[in-house]
Amino acid sequence: MAASKRPHLARMRMRVMRAVGSITLVALVVVLSSTDARAVSVKNFRELAAFYSAATAVPLTEPKVQLAYQNVRSRLPKAGTVDEFASPAVLGALELSGAFCGAFLTAEAAAVPEKRRAHQTVDFSKAPSALLDADVLAVVRNYARLFWLRDLRPNEEAQFGGAVTKLKSISPATAQGTRQVFLVLCTQVATSLDALVNR
Amino acid sequence: MRAMVTGVRCVATLLVVAGFSACALAEDESAAQSEALSSPEEMAKTIFLRLTGTGLLDSDPRYATMVQALYDNRSGDAARVATADPNFYRVILRNWSAPLSSTEGAIDNEFDDLQALAVGLVRDDLDARLLLTANFHYEGATPGIPAFAEVNNNHFKALEDRVVDLGTALVKKDGPALATPEYAGALTTRGFANAYYQAGTNRRAVVFAIKQFLCTPQSSWRDPNLPENFVRRDVHRDPPPNYEAECRTCHAPMDAMSGAFAHFDFEDGRPLYFGPFNVAPKYNINTSVYPDGYAPADDSWMNYATQHQNVALGWHGPVRGRGILAYGEMLSNSDAFAKCMVTTAFQATCRRPVEPEDQTFVNQTMNDFVAGGYRLRTLFERIAVSNQCP
């Protein structure tokens, strides 16, 4: 990819992440306003790091993960109470999940397909246009099992289907674009409420 | 322009998905609340999540082991699989133990020797009362980290920075953490000394020993009309109405118990020991404030918090004695200590405070905990396999 395109992608990804962070925060407030907030807790800094590590099999000692964790740790919830989950915490979770997802994709791409945790049907050398929507959705189903600890529901599959199509169309037509598609999807699943709230 | 349009589309798409996830979670919450732990397959994953904070894949061999144990009605064995996972120590027990050596109860408190003792006792499923009476401590056996030293916390900080598996890295060593002839578990650790002996007059040690290990704040155990014979010389008695109504209610029981710590202090980053014959100088400062007050000359102590509302603390055995070990034994044999262990383990495992509807479970669990020898790891496992958490 031309070096001049990278800053553009980074800015776009940051805009996406900020928007996702904001809607996650709003959604958290909406959901919890109708439930007993005392009974609900969010993962604290320690729980979140361990959860992402277990989901992705990326150790906490991986250098980029460790750096991201040190950067965001003070912003993440400490006690795990709902009122700790403000914008800085959401953005912190996004940054941390981004580091884990990035390392996760690197490890998955290096592994033979049958040994992978989530991307068994993905050819990381191909451009997004070469990916079948069904294969990408299969990966999202695996993300749900890893981060949401449950299967995708049929209506969620339908929603993700639309998102996948759009992501493929706007990502660069390179192998890096394919990685970008899965990085966005992985981070999105990892920072949704199902992943952040304790059950 | 084109990039901006596509960027906005991407944002819009993901906004819908993110919002949808929120609605799905709300539906799922109400479904989960009406669904008790049902199949062994469901139970295995739930127990593992409670005890480690992480998921358990179907492909993980431990899943099959736990499921089989549950089918065989061996829920304890199933939970034992989960408490062997590194995240039980790294997440659950660190969340549980971190506040113990912090006046603010900080859950992000740096790992230290007090917390290592607590974690080690759980790992080895030992008697919880050893938290306040042990004549041993735990250190890390990881190569290449600073040696254990009572003048700094570098050893334990390094264990945490290296992300070691505390379930295997900690080794039990004879003798207290502090190089003193006296021992009393956590009370003779550098972590406790740093938090509660440093500066002040060692009254903080009394307040927080009761708060951290009996889950009872000072506001609960202060009591008017107690004998004031142990109130030290540095406490103003003027004006008398204020002293009687306010100061005496705390100082009468607190000063009486503070003698247990008379041989200990912490200064310039290192613990200080003045025993067996001398009292730390801080016990006899500002003596001109009230010269007729108590002048500590040894480590004798008296527990006056035994009447009125404090009967509920459930003291057993001697309530007076000499030295830090006798004090630790008194605290650890109280009903309040057992209940505190159950309550804090419940909070760490279920990720929520104890509610009124949990009291029957807490009381029954406390009885079983005491009858079963105060075994800590078994306590966490019992809570995790119960239906009480959601």
Image: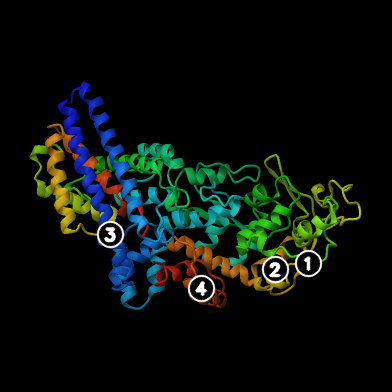
Q: Are marks 2 and 1 in contact (CB under 8 Å)?
A: yes
Q: Hey, what amino acid is under mark 2?
A: Met
Q: Residue at x 48, y 70 (%)?
A: B378
Q: Which residue is mark 4?
A: B359
Which one is in front, B300 or A33?
A: A33
Marks 3 and 2 sit apart, C-alpha to C-alpha, by 45 Å
Q: Position of residue A127 (x, y in %)?
A: 12, 35
Considering the numbered disc 4 on the image, is that residue within a helix, a strand or a loop?
A: helix
Q: Which mark is residue B330?
A: 2
Marks 4 and 3 sit apart, C-alpha to C-alpha, by 34 Å
Q: Residue at x 57, y 49 (%)?
A: B112
Nearer-N-terminus badge (3/2): 3
Q: Which residue is mark 1?
A: B321
Which one is in front, A14 or B223?
A: B223
Chain at tag 3 = B
Q: Hey, what amino acid is under mark 4?
A: Gln
Considering the numbered disc 3 on the image, is that residue within a helix, a strand or a loop?
A: loop
Chain at tag 4 = B
Q: Are marks 4 and 3 in contact (CB under 8 Å)?
A: no
Q: Which residue is mark 3?
A: B57
